[in-house]
Amino acid sequence: MKNIQSRWLEPLLAEALRAMPVVVVTGARQTGKTTLANTLGPGRRYLSFDDLDVLEQAERDPESLLVELPVTLDEVQRAPDVLLAVKRRVDKAREPGSVLLTGSANLALMHRVSESLAGRALYLDLPPFCPAEWRGDGVESTGIDALFKEEFSTADWPRGEIDWANWVSLGGFPDVLKASNDTARDLWFAGYVQTYLERDLRQLSNVGSLVDFQRLMRLLAAQTARVLNQSNLARDVGLPQPTTHRYLNLLETGCLITRLQNYQRSAGKSTAKARKVMWRDTGLAAWLAGVHGRNVAERADAGFWLEQVVFQTLQSWAALDVTRRVHFWRQGDAEIDFVLEQRGEIVGVEIKTTRRIGSDDLRGTRAFQAAFKRGSSVPRAVVLHLGGEARFLGGNAWMLGLGALLPK
């Protein structure tokens, strides 16, 4: 297919289809799942449950959709009972790549899904584009992988110019990135939210008041990159806590938000239950919160929006390896913005809007390293800032510029 923007997930998807009988790709609507599925070449049937005739067949006779394999079933969250038919079909003959399922909801979080396809399926995530991916650069251009090298030096970290504020308003949905002006962007997001509220949301659950739900979305967007206080959010929205909890679950199931876990060695610690809310798409969060890129750098909450922009790249990096996770860390008064995990190794990442780093900027970094020290070995930690200077700070800590992770 010509003029299709390549995705970092493509090689992993191809490898998964060679290894597993079922592969599931989930992500928010309009991230490019259908386009990605259609790049797999001829020989694979494609059926979408957005087609009402196909949806009716899936509800009436799901096995009939699986007679000819391989097949791609798109928007599978609209007919989750088809997973039982998929299980029966692949159990008869476990051929790699038999079924590719895509959906605009995290099937593992859907209450209506009774079949997880355990042992038969690999679940992959397709987030919106991050800046480097949209430019056509590989994930190695971000420098994140280099942070896990046994011997790291400033030479391993790429440098670049920064224009992060504009990305706050854009985010990573392809149609928005191609929009000709702010008006087109605003209209697209308005239509996206309306479609989510009036169609996608009601496929997931019964919601009593769409007005209340949208108000929660707007308040939650204004609190991006913060540790969630569900009681305060419920009070501000004017909803009971159980309803607020259910609405948050629906946003996460719909792949619109992620609630990062507090990284702790002991899950029994009280702070381990804390969650930090990040939106999967920066542009959507900014539109809901009424934030515009042209003035975000002067806002009092600029640091949170800079974290949100960086997270857009971190989630794309994490999607490329099933052993990768993104957390945050807080213990008492000490915290660090992100903890990257890969095959059991961790790297602490602190984000700063300043162009120079002082000793006060390292308190969270040093506390994180002390908390997870093993003998004489301390985990690597980096402070990423808007300046271009890169320098070793001692004790396996580094000061690095943010240019590699942000738009140029």
Image (cartoon, helix red, strand yellow):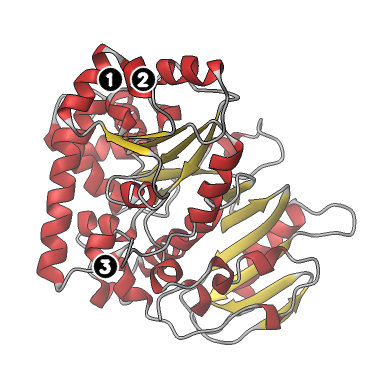
Instruction: Find residue 263 and report its horizontal and vertical position in percent.
Output: 62, 45
For mark 2, give the secondary structure: helix
For the point 56% across and 20% down, which residue is it? 93
Task: Say left or right for 297 vs 120.
Answer: left
Instruction: Find residue 234 and report its horizontal and vertical position in percent.
Output: 29, 34
For mark 1, give the secondary structure: helix
- Residue 81, picture quadrant: top left
User: In this orientation, which residue lies closer to the viewer: 408 or 216?
Assistant: 408
Residue 201 lies, with reference to residue 216, above or below; the image says above
Q: Which residue is mark 2?
A: 82
User: In this orientation, which residue lies closer to the viewer: 40 or 240?
Assistant: 40
Residue 133 lies, with reference to residue 253, above or below; the image says below
Of circles 3 and 1, which is in front? Answer: 1
- Residue 258, picture quadrant: top left
Task: Say left or right for 211 vs 126.
Answer: left
**Label 2 packing within 10 angstroms: few (<14), some (14-19), many (20+):** many
- Amino acid at dot 1: Ala
- Amino acid at dot 2: Val
Instruction: Find residue 151 and report its horizontal and vertical position in percent.
Output: 80, 71
For mark 3, give the secondary structure: helix
- Amino acid at dot 3: Leu
Q: Which residue is mark 3?
A: 177
For the point 18% across and 46% down, which residue is it? 193
Q: How many marks?
A: 3
Is mark 1 in CB contact (under 8 Å) with mark 2? yes
For the point 44% across and 33% down, which residue is it? 70
**What's the distance in space between the residues labelled 3 and 1, CA to CA?**
34 Å
Residue 157 lies, with reference to residue 117, above or below; the image says below
Q: Which residue is mark 1?
A: 58
Is mark 2 in CB contact (under 8 Å) with mark 3? no
